[in-house]
Image: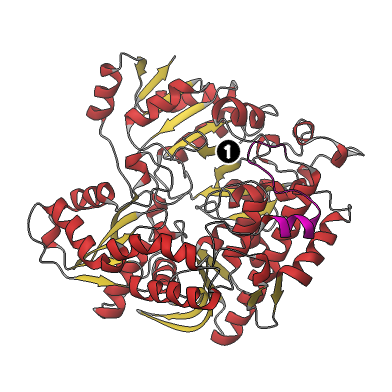
């Protein structure tokens, strides 16, 4: 049985194809169109998935969309009634789109599929619900026979958080929290106030938070304002927003800026304005509150299900700091997070939900169902060779150990490497297939990567990728994680004590002070978002890490996504070359080719 799942029309459109319950291919549309967070119908991703399986559309058993548009429309209508007359202008603006497209989504999807197939569509089209898609993407991909399931995001149809129980092939949804009360929307509102783009800049807020001085009382003042004025966290983990401080129901903006400015005593930050200690304190207060909410929700979920394994999904599940704090509580023995935890992963979840729930197919539990995230496009040596010769690049072809030895030596010599190998990753993280690599022990490397390569804010941290067996050497009580979804503190004995007055320095000056023996991946609070590569991996990145350890004694590198600010991760050899040429990357290693400028 072959099923295609689709997510589209909000952000991070994607397609995923499963065959007999196993994922064959999955990709986000942005990687093909080069439009970051592309929301359009995932035509290119669907074509890729079908090509990977070697089939046509009408050979599918079902196509599944990841949510139910009529329920979403019901929410919008109810919101207009609840907020009238304030919400009327937004309603009138959105109605033409709904009446022309979204309300008749079934017909639109069939038309899009017909365009791809080149013939009449005979395959049945089905719909999942948004939070079931999230839950299914996590549970069915997890290594658990039974599990608590917690999904937290902005909003689906009505649900903004949900608790479920996974057992065998079945998922039972037990409780929901409903719009407009939402942790995801709360985080998005602060993202907007801090001058970052909603549905994109939330991870920047998470990265900014540790720049707060924990000894300064400003963050506590802001936290008290959040608790007393903005939101109320109930004992059962449910959240209630004070809607006087939110405008997403009535306008296209998240917040009434003047009210927030009066409440917090700081101005709405514009994207090009400098960040200050007040912004860091506000981000820290928000992150602190978010962690409290996630822990409260998880505690309630565990009490309801009684299961000591947890599957997390939804956009909030990408908050790796909160994930690390949750794991450390011991509330659960083990936590699994879908690497494409946001809406892109909903495409896979929708397909899996229908396969197991509707068609009642049994489930095969696997240790790594997601195959290291390597579910996207792969390019042959012939295709890579053709690109190199077509563009007239200066390149050297190396085989086997030669390639690894030279690449490791370049990294040890302080070079920045564009690394293009194997299949493209599914989800927002580069996992060693479309990566920019550098030496984590180089104290200048964070600055070099942010300003000269990634062309992004200097405060942003970088993640280490390391051999799984190296984990105890650098981190205490850390569990292996191949998907870069948990933050752990660097071991105490590796930390370098911050000088007096450290938090009085500017953000750029703080970055000059090394935090550990791995300064380029040690964030201001002595933590790192880790990615481990297991011993049984046969990936090129595993072999490179082994060779780098042989040469330097360190089986750890910086791993950041192969892209620049405001662009998706590269997909094709052409994308990789273009990104390489417009940055100050030193070398591009693509397949067996070493490309220099």
Image coords of residue 261 (percent x, y): 75, 54
Is residue 260 found inside the magenta-colored segment of the image?
yes
Question: In the rendered view, would you say 166 is above or below 37?
Answer: below
Image coords of residue 298 (percent x, y): 61, 75
Quadrant that contains the N terminus: bottom left
Question: In the rendered view, would you say 346 is above or below 577?
Answer: below
Residue with the most extreme front position: 85
Range covered by the magenta-colored residues: 258-274
Image coords of residue 584 (percent x, y): 53, 21
Residue 330 location, quadrant? bottom right
Q: Which residue is mark 1?
A: 555
x 20%, y 55%: residue = 112
Quadrant that contains the C terminus: top left
Q: Residues within 10 Å of mark 1 (few under 14, many from 20)?
A: many
Image coords of residue 95 (percent x, y): 37, 64
Residue 580 location, quadrant? top left
x 39%, y 29%: residue = 576
Q: Secondary structure at mark 1?
A: loop
* Way the structure is coloured: secondary structure
Nearest the eye: 186 or 86: 86
Instruction: Tell me, yes or no, if residue 403 can be seen here.
Output: yes
Residue 102 location, quadrant? bottom left
Question: In the rendered view, would you say 525 is above or below 445?
Answer: below
Residue with the most extreme left position: 119
Question: In the rendered view, would you say 356 is above or below 436?
Answer: below
x 81%, y 66%: residue = 224
x 68%, y 38%: residue = 459
Instruction: Tell me, yes or no, if residue 491 can be seen here.
Output: no
Is residue 365 found inside the magenta-colored segment of the image?
no
Q: How many marks?
A: 1
């Amino acid at each position: 049985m072959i099923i295609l799942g689709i997510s589209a029309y909000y952000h991070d459109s994607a397609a995923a194809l499963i065959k007999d319950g196993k994922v064959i291919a999955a990709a986000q549309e942005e990687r093909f169109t080069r439009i970051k967070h592309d929301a359009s119908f995932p035509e290119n991703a669907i074509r890729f998935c079908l090509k990977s399986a070697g089939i046509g559309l009408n050979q599918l058993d079902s196509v599944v969309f990841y949510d139910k548009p009529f329920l979403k429309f019901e929410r919008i209508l109810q919101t207009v009634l609840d907020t009238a007359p304030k919400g009327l202008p937004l309603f009138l603006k959105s109605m033409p789109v709904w009446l022309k497209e979204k309300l008749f989504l079934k017909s639109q999807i069939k038309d899009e599929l017909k365009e791809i197939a080149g013939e009449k569509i005979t395959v049945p089209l089905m719909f999942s619900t948004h939070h079931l898609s999230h839950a299914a993407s996590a549970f069915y991909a997890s290594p658990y026979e039974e599990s608590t399931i917690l999904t937290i995001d902005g909003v689906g149809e009505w649900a903004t958080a949900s608790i479920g129980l996974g057992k065998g092939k079945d998922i039972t949804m037990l409780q929901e929290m409903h719009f407009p009360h939402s942790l995801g929307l709360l985080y998005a509102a602060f993202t907007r106030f801090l001058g970052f783009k909603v549905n994109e800049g939330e991870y920047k807020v998470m990265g900014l938070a540790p720049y707060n001085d924990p000894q300064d009382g400003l963050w506590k003042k802001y936290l008290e304002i959040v608790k007393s004025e903005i939101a109320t966290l109930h004992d059962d983990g449910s959240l209630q927003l004070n809607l006087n401080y939110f405008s997403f129901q009535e306008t296209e903006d998240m917040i009434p800026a003047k009210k927030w400015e009066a409440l917090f005593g700081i101005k709405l930050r514009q994207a090009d304005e400098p960040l200050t200690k007040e912004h860091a304190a506000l981000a820290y207060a928000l992150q602190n509150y978010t962690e409290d909410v996630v822990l409260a929700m998880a505690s309630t979920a565990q009490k309801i299900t009684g299961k000591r394994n947890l599957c997390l999904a939804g956009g909030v599940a990408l908050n790796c700091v909160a994930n690390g704090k949750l794991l450390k509580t011991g509330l659960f023995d083990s936590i699994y997070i879908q690497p494409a935890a946001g809406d892109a992963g909903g495409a896979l979840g929708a397909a899996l939900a229908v396969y197991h729930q509707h068609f009642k197919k049994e489930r095969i539990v696997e240790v790594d169902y997601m195959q290291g995230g390597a579910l996207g496009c792969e390019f042959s040596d012939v295709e890579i060779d053709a690109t190199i010769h077509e563009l007239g690049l200066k390149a050297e072809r190396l085989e086997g150990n030669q390639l690894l030895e030279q690449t490791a030596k370049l990294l040890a010599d302080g070079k920045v490497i564009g690394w293009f190998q194997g299949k493209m990753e599914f989800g927002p993280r580069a996992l060693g297939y479309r990566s920019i690599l550098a030496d984590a022990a180089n104290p200048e490397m964070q600055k070099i990567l942010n300003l000269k390569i990634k062309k992004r804010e200097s405060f942003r941290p970088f993640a280490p990728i390391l051999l799984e067996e190296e984990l105890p050497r650098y981190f205490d009580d850390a569990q292996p994680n191949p998907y870069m979804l948990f933050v752990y503190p660097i071991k105490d004995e590796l930390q370098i004590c911050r000088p007096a007055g450290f938090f009085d320095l500017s953000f750029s000056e703080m970055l000059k002070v090394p935090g550990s023996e791995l300064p380029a991946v040690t964030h201001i609070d002595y933590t790192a978002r880790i990615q481990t590569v297991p011993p049984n991996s046969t990936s090129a990145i595993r072999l490179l890490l082994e060779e780098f350890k042989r040469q330097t004694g360190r089986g750890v590198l910086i791993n950041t996504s192969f892209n620049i600010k405001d662009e998706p991760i590269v997909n094709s050899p052409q994308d990789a070359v273009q990104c390489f040429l417009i940055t100050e990357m030193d070398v591009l290693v693509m397949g067996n080719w070493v490309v220099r400028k």
